[in-house]
Image (tube, rainbow, N blue to C red):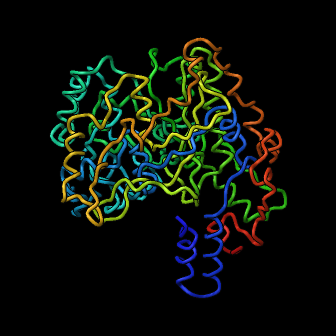
Amino acid sequence: MNQFALDEYSRFAVKGGTMNEARGKQFARLVMSHVDCDTIPFLWQYASRFVLFDNIFATEDSPSTPNAVAMISGQAGETQWVKHGPNGRSYIARNQPGTIQAPLVTDPEPFHGSQFDSTVMNREPAGAKEPYQDNDVATNLNFASLALTLLGRNAKAVMSQDLDQKNDLSGIKRDIEFIATHSGNPVAWRWYEEGYDREPTDNAATASHDSYISHHEAPQFFGYIANNPALKGNFRGLDDFFTDMAAGALPPDGGVFYLRGGYANIAKQEPYVRPGTPPNKAQKIRAMRGDDDHPGYSDRQISEAMAARVVNTIAGNPEIWKQSATIITYDESDGLYDHVPPRILSYGPDGLPLARGIRVPLIVISPYARVHAVSHVEGDHNAVIETINAIFGLPALANLPDEAQALAAGRAPPFNGPNGVVQNYLGPRDINSQISGDLLSAFDPKRLLGLEPLLPGSYASIADEAVTSFPHYGSRGCATLGIVTEDRRQDIANTIPPGFNPLPKTYPDDN
């Protein structure tokens, strides 16, 4: 981790020349930067008022896709690797064999909706701005996920409707039987992601999928989800969440709901541009309208405004608010430096560290939450899965027969890591242990027992005029919230280096 800045510098400086060295220096400085409460005051406000988890890591030492998949499965395909090897099944597209096999370690596109998918009717959408190269599409994933355990006793009946059972169910046959036999009522779930279907940003009557980032849509990677008509209704666009909330169309018994932004923002907001910014630079800034807080195309304040609209919508509905727990987190760290190194829990087929990745922020907002609290529980995206398991009484993914078998097989010598390291974690780890806790410490026992009143929705809400005004809180978020950052409290000099370029890729001339 201490070489993050060096790596960024070296990838440009190695080309030689003053300009490349200058560009490398700017990217290295960007790695060492941070985002304070003047820049993202809404997220700081949630962290200050509710519960911040400061010891949660990305599940995989990788970019977005593997960790998006891990958000619902606790892994990126280690189970599939152990069972089928790193080669797996090869598909054909345009007479070229392809697909990336598990475990995923890059940002491939999902199999369903790609050029390898032979589905004719009701195909999954492909992101209009996604590359879909023949050598950059994931294989069909077929290990267990929350989408399977949430089916409860209906697992066998629902899975019987899959359109390609030979390939889609080959890795979960015993899991299905176990879940159907040992589980209770099904629990509803939905994945709302911007651009999946028609959004307010579309001009035509049909969906353009221009804002859809398909390699972030975790359920679409799994054949037994994406290729099952009984589960199609769980895939929705981002605006559908607000429409469903307004219409009272969420499942009456609750459920698990994921929300993700995309390349645009359905509120049609424009990033704030400082007065006096040259027109050519202002144009580039305004083009970064994404709302998923990903570098390169999104804006931090537009992204936190989207999160605030979601929280406000939940907090503004008393019936929903009183039975809600909202988790704000990230799939991975965007490459920013962190002084806390992750545990190395596993190695991939290439012998390089696979798990874990760098720390990610995680905030829990709930009427049952503790206030002004920080939890030091260690974990990764499995911590979210553990919490869902506890709330809804689901079996742990790691205890399902097919996953348990793969975890045991992964400990064998053929899968040993460097220097003969035994691989104990080639699969999900959603069982409470020293290296993987849950998020239940976020909740106040007295509120859960009715001994203390629930926090009102107003405590979580941010005024609409603040959400729609840029810059947020007039760029004085820290002062508005009464937050004194540690560098100021301890009188530590935190001087921005002369010539620091916060957008070295966007403004290369400033390097």
Residue 465's x, y, as percent?
77, 33
Nearest the eye: 500 or 136: 500
Q: Residue at x 35, y 60 (%)?
A: 136
The outermost residue toward the top is 450
Identify the residue shown where x is 20% and y is 35%.
401
* Residue 454 horizontal side relative to residue 99, left or right: right
The front one of 83 and 276 is: 83
Residue at image position (62%, 81%) is: 21
Lateral position of residue 24 relative to residue 345, left or right: right
**Which residue is most to the left?**
166
With respect to residue 90, does 326 lie above or below? above
> What percent of the width, then of the height, locates residue 371?
66, 29
Residue 491 on image: x %, y %: 81, 56
For this rendering, which residue is in front, 272 or 328?
A: 328
Residue 374 visible: yes
Residue drawn at point x = 56 percent, y = 87 percent: 16
Q: Along the line of sight, which residue is nearer the eye, 87 or 342?
A: 342
Residue sticking out furthest to the bottom: 17
